[in-house]
Amino acid sequence: MSTTKNAIHLGGEFRREEAIANVAITPGMLCEFMSTGKVKPHATAGGRGLKLFAVEDALQGHAIEDDYAAAALVSMNDYVSGAKVQGLLAAGVAYVIGDEVVSAGDGTLQKASSLASAGLNLQTIGYCSEAVDLSASGAVDTLGGIFLA
């Protein structure tokens, strides 16, 4: 069962970044910079990149449930290994403590084991710090605790 907190950042060191959103972005999404200087959800399943997560826009009175619109200024944290965040986990599977997660290619995170059979060279983003069951047919992408690799 997910124990969602009211902030994406749960602990550890980071550097704050800001950029204009190319598309709508949800707090907890893994993000990447574009050649235009804008930011978008990380788009390569299992791919390399920064541990760059969109965080809630608390200075504007927004919570973790409030998405950034396209063309809005997005606040993000670029994390170091060992930090803990609430990352957006992809629906469709059950996550258990210790599961290795990688980019799902849409800003969410997924189990590395779901891509391992494809023979890809995966970049581990982190490991689940809590169990979150998203295997039910009506499950939606949900925030879950992640210790970053």
Image: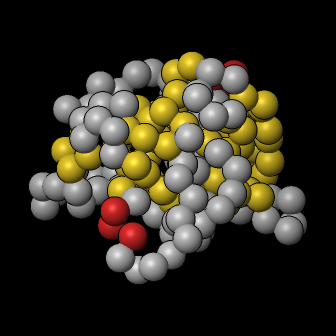
Outermost right residue:
36
Task: Name the residue: 36% across, 56% down.
Answer: 111
Q: Is residue 107 visible?
A: no
Image side of residue 57 versus residue 104, left or right: right
Outermost bottom residue:
118
| Residue 19 place in picture, x, y as percent | 80, 48
| Residue 138 place in picture, x, y as percent | 16, 57
Task: Name the residue: 58% across, 29% down.
Answer: 82
The colour style of the image is secondary structure
Viewer-closest of 148 and 75? 148
Outermost left residue:
136
| Residue 131 place in picture, x, y as percent | 24, 36
Quadrant of the frame with the C terminus: top right
Task: Name the residue: 65% across, 62% down.
Answer: 48
Q: Quadrant of residue 2?
A: top left
Task: Name the residue: 12% across, 55% down.
Answer: 136
Image side of residue 97 versus residue 41, left or right: left
39 to 15, vertically: above or below: below
| Residue 88 place in picture, x, y as percent | 44, 46
Quadrant of the frame with the N terminus: top left
Q: Quadrant of residue 11?
A: top right
